[in-house]
Image (cartoon, helix red, strand yellow):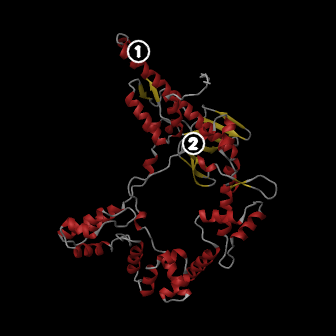
Amino acid sequence: MLSSARLLQRQKQSMVASPQLIESIRLLQLARAELHQFVEQELEKNPLLEPASNDGEALGDVPISADQSTGAREKDTDRPTNAAAAERPGEWKSLRNTTNTPADSRPALDEFAACTETLHDRVAGQIALTAFTPQERLIAGELAAHLEDTGYLRVDLVELAGKLNAREADVERVLATLQQFDPPGIFARTLSECLEIQLRQRDRFDPAMAALVSNLEMVARRDFQALKQHCCVDEEDLLEMLHEIRALDPKPGNRFQSGAPESIIPDVWVTPSPGGGWQIELDPDALPKVLINQTYFAEISRHAVQNPKDQAFLNECLQNANWLIRSLDQRAKTILKVATEIVRQQDAFFQHGVAHLRPLNLRTVAEAINVHESTVSRVTSNKYMLTPRGVFELKYFFTVAIASCQGGDAHSAEAVRHRIKAIIAQESPGDVLSDDEIAVRLKETGINVARRTVTKYREAMNIPSSVGRRREKRLWLIGDQS
C-alpha cells in the first residue's frame, strides 16, 4: 500500500534587521573616539553631510542634560553647561564656566598635560654625553633602539653583534656601560638583573643578597624558611633584605612617559544640583555635530533630475544623512536615560561613598527606562562618568548582591570588597585576621558572607593570606624602626 504524499504549508514570522538598524545598534556600543572616527568616515562618503559650526542647529549644540532629584527626573536643555572634576571627595575644580561658552574659546584639556621627558629621550641624552668611540656609539644606539618602555632590553646580543659586524665582547662592554645609566636598573634583561644593577649601585649586592635575588620565585611564594637556608641568614636579616628588595623599582622605565598621555574623557558629568539631588549632563564635545547642507542639496537636485542614476545616488545620500542624525540623537538620549537611572539607583554611593554602593543589574535599569537589557549593556560599554568621587566606567555601578544577615537590604559585591580591604588595612602586626575572622567581622556589620567568598575577594584584590600579611607587616615594622 502506497502512502500518499502530503504537502503542508506553515506560516512563520521572523524579524530581519536592516543594515541601518544594525548600524544604529552598533553606534550605541562605540566609545567616544570610535564614534568620532565613524562620523568622520560618513562625512567623507556623504557629500550632503557637513560638520556643524558652533552656532549651527545640529545635534549636540545644546548640551542634553537631566536634573535628578529624589524620586523624579527632569530634562532641562536650558540649563547652563557646567561640569566639575573631583580632586578628592567634597572638593571641586571647575573645568568650564557656569555660562555657555563658545567651544573654540575653551581651553582644551590636552593643554593642561605637562610635556614630560620620555625614557628614550633620557637615554639618548646620556649616550651623547658618554665618551664612546664611533663604533661603541653605534652599538649603544642599536641597544637603545631595543629598549622597552619598562626599561628592559629585549635583544639577542649575539645576533646584534653579527648585524653590526662587531665582537660580542664589545657589545657586552657597551651594555655594561648603559646599565649604569639613570634611572637605575634600565637595560636589564631579567628582573633579577634589574634588581642586581640597582643593588650594586647602592653597594648592597653581597653574597646573601645575591642568593636572594637568584631565588625570586621563593620570594613570590613567601617561602621564608627556604630563603633563610639559601641566603645563610636568620629571620631578622632576611626581613631586612626583603625590605630593601621591596624598595627597588622592578620596572624603572615606567616613571617616564612613552609618548602622549592617554586620558579617559568622561561622556557623562554628574554634579550636585543647587536645589538638591544631582544634575546629569552629556559632554557636548562627546556628541559629533553634523547637519545636511540644504543649499548644496537643492543645487544638485536640479541637475540630478535629468539622470536617474544621479537621482538615486542623491536620494540614498539624503536617506543616510537623515539616518545618521536620528541615530546620533537617539544614542545621546539613550545614554542620558541610562546614566540618569544609574544615578537615581546609586544615590547613596554619590552621597556617602563606595561602602554604600547598591547591588544593581542590567534588567533593573532596562525595566526602569523601558528598553532591552542588551541596550543597557551596549550603552554602558566603554562609557565613563565624571562624579564628585572620581571617574568611573558605567559598568562599575553594576554588581551582584550579597545577602544581609539582618533581613535588611542586600549589599553590593563591590561594597563588600571595599569593607574587606578596610578591615585588613586596620590590622596591626600583632592582630592579623584570618578569612574566617574577617567573615565574622562582616557578619557583625550585617553582611552575610562565607569564608570562601572572603578568600575569593581577597585573592582578586591581590591581598596575601593572613600568614603572608603577618610576615609583611613585621617586615615593614623592622624597616620603619631602622
Relative horizontal placement of residue 124, taking residue 383 as reference (left or right): left
Circle 2/circle 1 CB separation < 8 Å: no
SS for callout 2: strand
Expressed as whole percent of the image width and height from the top left, the position of residue 454 reads: 68, 64
Relative horizontal placement of residue 144, taking residue 108 as reference (left or right): left
Expressed as whole percent of the image width and height from the top left, the position of residue 215 reads: 46, 79
Relative horizontal placement of residue 23, taking residue 442 as reference (left or right): left
Relative horizontal placement of residue 71, taking residue 65 as reference (left or right): right
The answer to whether 446 is drawn above or below residue 249 in the figure is above
Expressed as whole percent of the image width and height from the top left, the position of residue 107 reads: 45, 43
Q: Report the residue that reaches farthest toward the right.
A: 407
Q: Quadrant of the C terminus?
A: bottom right
* Mark 2 or 1, nearer chain start: 2
- Closer to us: 12 or 202: 12
- Residue at position x 55%, y 82% in the image: 224
- Closer to us: 86 or 11: 11
- Residue at position x 69%, y 57% in the image: 355
The answer to whether 336 is drawn above or below residue 138 in the figure is above
Please state which amino acid type lies under the numbered disc 2: Val
Q: Report the residue that reaches farthest toward the top.
A: 306
Question: Within 10 Å of the Cα at label 2, are there few (<14), some (14-19), or many (20+) other Cα atoms?
Answer: many
- Closer to us: 120 or 169: 169
Residue 63 seen from this side:
no
Q: Quadrant of residue 8?
A: top right
Q: Quadrant of residue 174?
A: bottom left
Residue 167 seen from this side:
yes
What residue would you read off at disc 1?
298
| Measured Cα–Cα span from mark 2 to mark 1 | 38 Å
- Residue at position x 63%, y 65% in the image: 458
Question: Within 10 Å of the Cα at label 1, are there few (<14), some (14-19), or many (20+) other Cα atoms?
Answer: few
What residue would you read off at disc 2?
268
